Structure formats: C-alpha cells, structure tokens
Amino acid sequence: MIDFKGFVDGEAFEGGEAEDYPLVLGSGSFIPGFEDQLIGAKVGDEVKVEVKFPEEYGAPNLAGKDAIFECTVKAVKAAKKAELDDELAKKFGADDLDALKAQIRERLESEYQGASRQILKRALLDKLDDAVKFDLPESLVEAEAQQIAHQLWHEENPEVHDHNHGSIEPTDEHNKLAERRVRLGLLLADIGQKAEVTVSDQEMTQAVLRQARQFPGQERAFFEFIQQNPQAQQQLRAPIFEDKVVDHIVEGAKVSDKEVTKEELEKAIEALDEV
C-alpha cells in the first residue's frame, strides 16, 4: 500500500499521484521497473523510483520520458487463501457455508441453462432459416439493414453518443443479416399468431422491472416513459413473444439432450458470436 507522486523534468504531471494505492508486486500493472524498486521496502520507507515511460505509452506528453516517483510505503501485505467456513459465507450475506454453496450452485445452474437455451434457440432459428424461403418486403429489409449498420457503427465508435454523423451505408453482410432477421421475424409472428401465443401483463411487468434496474434512482421516470411510449413497450414485448414462440416450436419438435463439459459449453457460446 503506497502513496506516490510522479515527476517529469522536475514537474509533477497530471494523473501521476495517488494515496493508499494497493500495488501488487509482480502484477506488472505499473511501468516496467517500477515494482522491482519497491521489493524489500518496509512500512514507513520513502523510496524514489526512477523509471522511463515506454515509447508507445498512451499519453504522448509522457511517452519515452524519464520520470521519478516519490513513494511512501504505508503497509506491506501478502495474499492469503480464505478459509472456507461459515464466517466467510456470512461476509457474502449467507447464513452459513452450506447456504452459500447452495446460492452458488443455483446461480451456476441458471447460467448454464441460459447458455444451453441460447444454443438451442440459434440451432432452431438456423433450421427455420434454411427450411423456409419467401419474398420479403424490400422496405422492411432496407430499414433493418440500416438499423444494423447504424448500431454496429456506434459500437465501433463508442465516443459518439449522438446521431450527428454522416450517413452509414449498409454492407452486403448487413443486408444478408437483415434478410434473415426480417424473414424469421415474420415467420415467428405468423406461427405465434396461429398458435395464439400472447404476452401476459405479468410478463410485461416483470420485463419492465428488470429493465428499470439498469437505471437506479430513475425507476419512476423509466416506468412513466414505458407507459407513454408504445414503441418502447413493443421493444420489451417482442423478445418475450419470440421466446414463447420458440418454446411452442420446441414442444412439438424432437429434442435430445447432450451432456457437455463447462469448457465445451463456453466454446459453443463463443461460436455463436462468431457467426
């Protein structure tokens, strides 16, 4: 645990100062050579650490510069394995160790089930996409392709929060993905309508509550926004409806269980993002 203040050419620089910083020796989290000069220091020691910023350092005003960090050692600690006992469980809000294990087991089962569900759903949608072909309304495909291109552009340019940018032209890949989404959307809507699949008020309420948790302190404003915005309601209702239609199709399909390891499940999930 150290206090430090950095100087370049005798002048303190912005971002080069901290108090009670928990630096783990050997972590390599600081400039090369910094941690080595603190090895063996004791509580109360004042150490002048002399280093050189890498040429490719992120801050141009510091890249390649010699620097001195004045450090004061506040505490020296070592990591210790925690004892797996009731006291540890209570630190995590559980009554005892058995209760903590049960909570962890339940959470892992939920995560694995969710991952398995993703794989099942993708496999089903791939089958439907291959099996069913029909002409699509060009206006829907164009609008979807534009939305996909726009969304991906913002993901690649996270510093831009508004829409004051030039026009974004969809690529062939965007158009192909848009055709798939529109085709499957229309198909699932038709199947759901014929099967009389509906989204209940209770399911909508739960969806709103889940979404509202992402806006702590602004829940009331979020509820009012949803109530007054039919388009926002539809954006919440659509994935619930789609999942219920998928469940309806799966109920009538021949589905076999396949036992896999955790690593195989993780690789299968990663593969979904690559497609």
Image (spheres, rainbow, N blue to C red):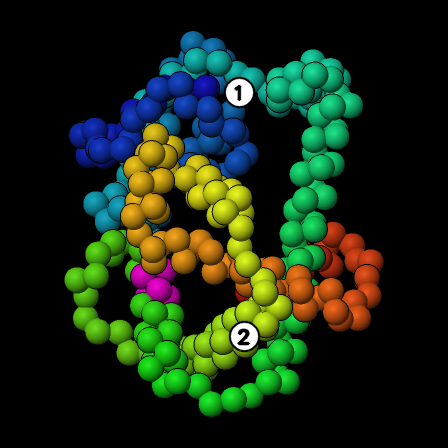
Q: Residue 199 carries which label?
A: none
Q: Is residue 239 visible?
A: yes
Q: What is the quadrant of the C terminus in the image?
A: bottom right
Residue lying at 70% horizontally and 34% vertically, measured from the top left: 104
Q: Is residue 270 visible?
A: no
Residue lying at 62% horizontally and 68% vertically, measured from the top left: 195
Residue 231: horizontal and vertical position, in percent? 34, 58
Q: Which of marks 2 and 1 is in front?
A: 2
> Pointer 2: what residue?
190
> Pointer 1: what residue?
40
User: Mark 1 falls on what kind of element?
Assistant: loop
Viewer-proximal residue among 232 and 103 = 232
- Magenta residues, as a range? 151-155
Identify whether 78 is placed above or below 28: above
Identify whether 254 is placed above or below 42: below
| Left or right: 274, with 265 as reference point | left
| Left or right: 43, with 256 as reference point | left
Identified by mark 1, the residue type is Gly
Viewer-proximal residue among 101 and 57 = 101
